[in-house]
Amino acid sequence: MNTLFILNDAPYGSERSYNALRLARALGKKEGEKVRVFLMGDSVACAKGGQKVPEGYYNAGDMVRMVGGEVALCGTCLNARGIADSEIVPGATRGTLDQLATWTAEADKVLVF
């Protein structure tokens, strides 16, 4: 099964992106499951490296690294927020709308958060 997660919300302030990343990681551990995550809008900040959060609080950057599948970020959204490719956590890459369209067409399920 091929599942695509599309995230839109900022990493902190609500728990939508946090819950999506948790579910993507859990699903990716299941046999026969392929997980892809595409970050758009404010959710691109989830994949920004060097996040410092209070002790005991989740780190969205660490969660992105642990997804276990492909993770792409909207390049236009990165540019709008002044996030350079060099600031993205390992395992995540700059993506495009065409890539998202391809991933969507290939997916058996698309979950939007």
Image: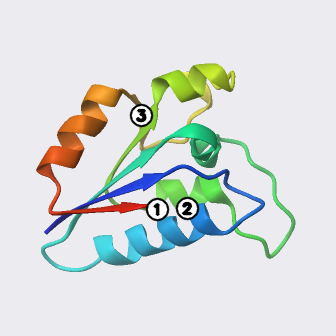
Q: Look at label 3 and name its amino acid.
A: Thr
Q: Do callouts 3 and 1 mark residues in contact (Cβ within 8 Å)?
A: no
- Describe residue 52's horizontal placement relative to residue 86 as left or right: right
Which residue type does callout 1 highlight? Met
Q: Which mark is residue 66?
A: 1
Q: Mark 3 sits on what residue?
A: 93
Extreme residue toward the right, this view: 54
- Quarter of the image where the N terminus is located: bottom left
Q: Which SS class for mark 3?
A: strand
Mark 3 Cα-neighbour bin, 10 Å: few <14, some 14–19, many ≥20 = some
- Element type at marker 2? helix
Residue 8 is situated, as x and y percent measured from the top left of the image, at 54, 49
Q: CA distance from mark 2 to mark 3?
A: 15 Å
Whether residue 77 is situated above or below residue 64 in the rendered picture: above
For the point 55% across and 41% down, which residue is it?
Answer: 89
Q: Secondary structure at mark 1?
A: loop
Residue drawn 30% across and 70% down?
28
Instruction: Give residue 97's position: percent from left, percent from top.
Output: 34, 29
